[in-house]
Image (spheres, rainbow, N blue to C red):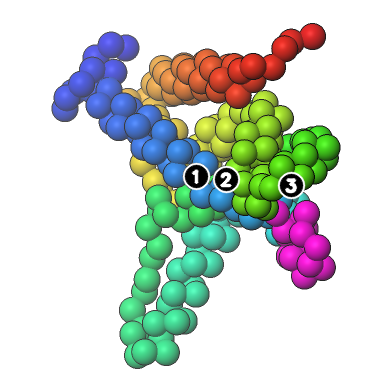
Amino acid sequence: MFDVLSIGESGFGDEILLGAWLTIKLALASLIFGLFLGLTAAAGKLSNSRLARFAANAYTEIIRGVPEMLVVLVVFFGASTILQKAMGWFGYNAYIEVNAFLAGTWALGLVFGAFASEVLRGGFLAVPLGQIEAGIACGMTGWQVFKRIRLPQMWRFALPGLGNLWMVLLKDTSLISVIALDELLRWSKVAAETTKQPFTFYMVAAFIYLFFAILSDMGRYRLEARASRGIRKA
């Protein structure tokens, strides 16, 4: 078993580590993109504009109602089709394939943002209205109220939910293996098929995902503790 997990030409240890590193990079890139989409959608749902509310609600309903695997495939092949049609207008008719990492980031970010929008919307609504009115009464601008009152407390309310969504996102990176991105699960599958030892490599992948989950939980606890500074516990 240790021979097939060794580093170098005789084993797949280095490939597994590279796949794990790519998994983390994919998850973090998707998190950043997803948070941006989630904040935008949450703001749209709380907007006074009917068009903004409709667009935000349509985005979340569509993405949450479609399997994540299908979102990945639609983004990967759909983006290629759109780019080919766009370039065809300029006389370029060769096949264009979207980078798998970029497509994976878009797809997972779309999914994360759709679910995060409800968590963030709930966080915004949980901030006491009296504190916002007090900020305005003290002469704060709308941006100052958002930055100093709404945003810090919104994160405190939203962190537990966002932490759970991060866990789901971390595991959903395995779906990107279907578009040939060499992340952790894809390298585990290649190694398992090559060595005929599927149990070994899939168990290694499981322990790596579990390790990432434990580290993520530790990070979430620290962030929650930091966001709750100065608040008396009941």
Mark 2, Cα crowd under 10 Å, few <14 / some 14-19 / many 20+, is many
Instruction: Please give the name of the residue rendered at 69% of the width and 17% of the height, measured from the top-left corner.
Output: 231
Q: Is residue 134 visible?
A: yes
Where is residue 136? Give x, y as percent.
74, 47
Occupied quadrant, residue 6: top left
Q: Nearer the viewer, residue 48 or 175?
A: 48
Identify the image quadrant of the N terminus.
top left
Q: Specify the label residue 77 is tagged with.
A: none
Q: Amino acid at mark 2?
A: Leu
**What separation in Å lies between label 3 and label 1 (alpha carbons)?**
31 Å
Residue receiving disc 1 = 32
The relative height of residue 106 versus residue 30 in the rendered view (above or below) is below
Q: Amino acid at mark 1?
A: Ile
**Residue at (44, 74) in percent of width and height:** 83
Mark 3 vs mark 1: in front: 3
Where does label 3 land, which residue? 136
3 or 2: tag closer to the N-terminus: 2
Magenta portion: prevailing SS class: helix
Quarter of the image with the C terminus is: top right
**Residue drawn at x 54%, y 60% as measured from the top left:** 75
Q: Nearer the viewer, residue 203 or 220?
A: 220
Q: Position of residue 105 (x, y in %)?
A: 47, 50
* Circle 3: residue type: Ile
Q: Are marks 2 and 1 in contact (CB under 8 Å)?
A: yes
Place of residue 61 in the rendered image (x, y in percent of width and height, measured from the top left): 77, 55
Q: Is residue 229 magenta?
A: no
Kindly identify which residue carries mark 2.
35
Q: Which residues are magenta?
A: 43-57
Which residue lies at the image location 65% right of the left edge and 52% below the top edge?
A: 141
